[in-house]
Amino acid sequence: MPEPQCARPRTIAVKATAVAATAAPERRPGSSEGGAPTGRPRGLWSDAWHDLRRNPVFVVSALVIVFLVVISLWPSLIASRNPLSCDLARAQEGSRPGHPFGFNGQGCDVYTRTVHGARTSVVVGVLASLGVAVTGSVLGALAGFFGGAWDAVLSRITDVFFAIPVVLGGLVLLSLVAGTTVWPVIGFMVLLGWPQISRIARGSVITVEQNDYVQAARALGASHTRILLRHILPNAVAPVIVVATIALGTFIALEATLSYLGVGLRPPAVSWGIDISDASPYIRNSPHMLLWPAGALAVTVLAFIMLGDAVRDALDPKLR
């Protein structure tokens, strides 16, 4: 029996609907019904921030660092006593009401000195990292961009600085400077810390310089300054930020090491390294004198290193 004429249009319509449903693009967050994005596309930094907010390592380390920054700026919020106020009658005493960390060998409150010592560590770490990042980035970017004699000379200079042991250099250089401020220590760290950042910035600039958009800008007659500042540095700065963030924790540990050896900060400055050095002879009889400043130092260094690892994972596409 022949098929009724009215059935064919319905069959064709059903098939067309099925094909359309199969070919319809899947709707994604941030897209309209037609598949067009409703918001602006994310770049490298916005995409990295999107990943960092969902990384528990970043969240925990960032909270610890924010707490350290707050107590560095306003230590009196949680420690109202003077860290230089001491009572020899209470020397090496343990925990008491109002003095949860006990007293050190000079009768100073360990809790107050631990809180106020955070300011020194944060200031040294942040300023040394900024100085190293700026100095190393400028020199490395110029060497990678211009090459030639500038690159050769800078490479030999960085080799010389890499050959200097950091602690030995600190013992020699800082022993010539007598002071209780952080500036000699920061200057020493910048002096011996910039070569590593310079090498990284140089390699990153050389890699970015080979991209097509840089060659196109050069072919259009863009100046060296415009190419370097507009096209190269924004795309080459990510590795520098990662290394500088991780190095921040290293600089904090280095300051404590130099202060422990007696060539960094000196009394009456308040530093975790000074407190650890003063507590070392009493570690068996009064371990609390060493436990709290050493624990605060370890937590601070660990927080900055974890923050740097999280930033590296977010900025490196190979680790996604």
Image (tube, rainbow, N blue to C red):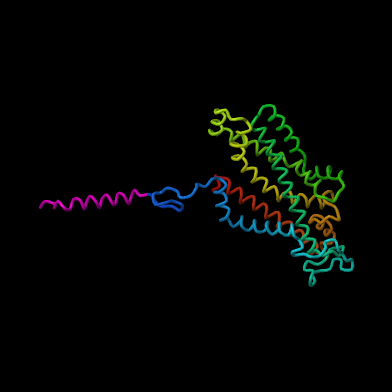
| Image quadrant in which you'd find residue 296 | bottom right
Q: Main secondary structure of the magenta part?
A: helix
Q: Quadrant of residue 64?
A: bottom right
Asked whether residue 140 is drawn in magenta, I would say no
Left/right placement of residue 286 relative to residue 218 reads right
**Residue 299, percent from left and from top:** 70, 58
303 or 98: nearer the eye?
A: 98
Q: Residue furthest bottom?
A: 97
> For the point 58% across and 53% down, which residue is it?
52
Magenta segment boundaries in residue numbering: 1-24
Count of numbered badges drawn on the protein:
0
In the rendered view, would you say 81 is above or below 309? below
Residue 174 drawn at (x, y percent): 83, 45
Picture residue at 17% right of the left edge, 53% below the top:
7
Residue at the image position 10 percent from the left and 53 percent from the top: 1
- Magenta region includes residue 7: yes
